[in-house]
Image: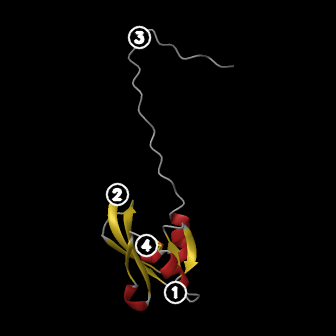
Amino acid sequence: MTMINHINMANEDNEIYCCLRNKVVRADAEHTQKFCSRCKMYQGNAQGGGIECRWEDSRIGSDWLVITDPFEEWVFNQKKKVSLPIIAITDPGFHFLDVN
Ligand code: SF4
């Protein structure tokens, strides 16, 4: 995982993807006052074009990313990473059960 500054550029409806709320939101004064002002991920207003948010991301290659489609970003962030433990079976007397 890489700590990435996500530069969320607002779309034509002034919407961005918000990681904290895990939804597409309006990047308006209400959202920034209610949520961004207390959010540890907040990095700025993208020079007036949206909201910059910094969090650990599975994407690699750069420590910053420009996001122009908040809905595509929402879809990407619904993919949960699941890791399964690797179990070593060392007991020679171990037998798998046959289930018919
Ligand atoms: S700073 Fe936090 S609350 Fe504001 S848009 Fe980013 S993730 Fe959401």
Q: Is residue 98 left or right of residue 48?
A: right
Marks 4 and 3 sit apart, C-alpha to C-alpha, by 56 Å
Task: Name the front one of labels 4 and 3.
Answer: 4
Q: Label 1: state its secondary structure.
A: helix
Marks 2 and 3 sit apart, C-alpha to C-alpha, by 38 Å
N-terminal label among 1 and 2: 2
Q: Mark 3 points at which residue?
A: 92
N-terminal label among 4 and 3: 4
Q: Which residue is outermost to the right?
A: 100
Q: Is residue 64 left or right of residue 26?
A: left
Q: Name the residue under label 2.
A: 1
Instruction: State whether label 4 is within 8 Å of ligand 1.
Output: yes
Q: Label 3: state its secondary structure.
A: loop
Asked if the residue under mark 2 is in contact with the one under mark 1, i.e. CB atoms within 8 Å, the reply is no
x 43%, y 81%: residue: 51
x 47%, y 13%: residue: 94
x 31%, y 66%: residue: 61
Q: Name the residue under label 4.
A: 38
Marks 1 and 3 sit apart, C-alpha to C-alpha, by 65 Å
